[in-house]
Amino acid sequence: MEKRIKQGYIALALVSFFWGTTYIASKIGTKHMPGIFLAGVRQFTSGALMVGFFLLRGYKLPAWADLKKIAVQGFFLLCLANGLLTWALEYLSSGLAAIIAALVPLFVALFSIWFGRAARITRWMFIGLLTGFAGVVTIFYDYLGQMGNRSFVFGVILALLSVVSWSYGTVYTATRKVHADLLMVTGLQMLAAGLILLPVCLVTGKYVNLVDTGTEAWYAIAYLVFFGSFVGYSSYVVALNKLPATLVSIYAYVNPIVAVLFGWILLNEKMNAHMILGTLITIGGVWLVNREFKKQQV
């Protein structure tokens, strides 16, 4: 059990850092191609490589019942959530998108209550929820002038829908165990998402010829495939299967800090008192919700 928990914490540390940096890579990638296409290429490439690797090593595909669960997990976590968030980065800064995504633990707690894995919303949990959203409002103080910009508002809506989908997918994954190798499952989730996203891009015209995108776009894709999917998402799945879902969700405390910091350094994105204060308030609210939720777990 100690080894299992240690592996879970190592995986959680990798998720916490590398997923923060993927906001930067995704933002760079969306300068050269539609965000939903970038997500599709990332997921399909990562999934095909990972599944192919395990099949060549003699692994068998999971049973049909497990494949259905894996497909649903991939749909909510990678097709909807990652696809929408990457699309949102066409309109939002990487730091702002990461801060909105930091609301995930709040929704994880709410969905966990809905699934019956927690008894009720306590007073402190309610205060935490309000605090978390107050933090986001504080951050948006600097963006009030952009609220009349339809593209900006559309990006915010996409990011919020991504949060809801990822939160639901997280709880669903934790409550629907699959009897198969974890990394094989990870690859199948990615492949399922890619097989949905790319045809959607083809039908809607949201695609480009990758040959014409340039070196910067290829670097962004390579980073997302290796550090975002192979290292980051694989670690996330491992952590989710070795640690409680609400504990795993603390990666959302670190991701926005990493994204805001690297966005400021590498992309000259905004960082000021409201951004820093709002981030800290949001993280404080998330911490309160997680603390109260853990008290109700058995």
Image (cartoon, helix red, strand yellow):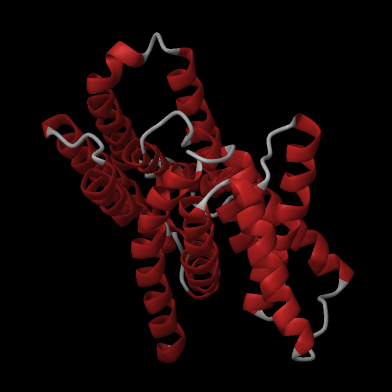
Picture quadrant where residue 124 is located:
top left
Q: Nearer the viewer, residue 80 or 21?
A: 21
Picture quadrant where residue 279 is located:
top left
Q: Position of residue 214 (x, y in %)?
A: 52, 50
178 to 254, vertically: above or below: below
Considering every residue shown, the one lying at the far top of the view is 148
98 to 249, vertically: above or below: above
Left or right: 106 in relation to 181: left
Considering every residue shown, the one lying at the far left of the view is 273
Q: Is residue 157 visible?
A: yes
Q: Position of residue 110 (x, y in %)?
A: 49, 42
Q: Position of residue 233 (x, y in %)?
A: 53, 65
Q: Is residue 168 visible?
A: no
18 to 150, vertically: above or below: below
The residue depicted at 79 percent of the width and 68 percent of the height is 66
Q: Position of residue 36 (x, y in %)?
A: 62, 40
Q: How many marks?
A: 0
Left or right: 276 in relation to 283: left
The residue depicted at 28 percent of the width and 24 percent of the height is 140
The residue depicted at 29 percent of the width and 14 percent of the height is 144
Q: Nearer the viewer, residue 9 or 270?
A: 270
103 to 257, vertically: above or below: above
The residue depicted at 53 percent of the width and 30 percent of the height is 158
Left or right: 27 in relation to 168: left
Considering every residue shown, the one lying at the far right of the view is 64
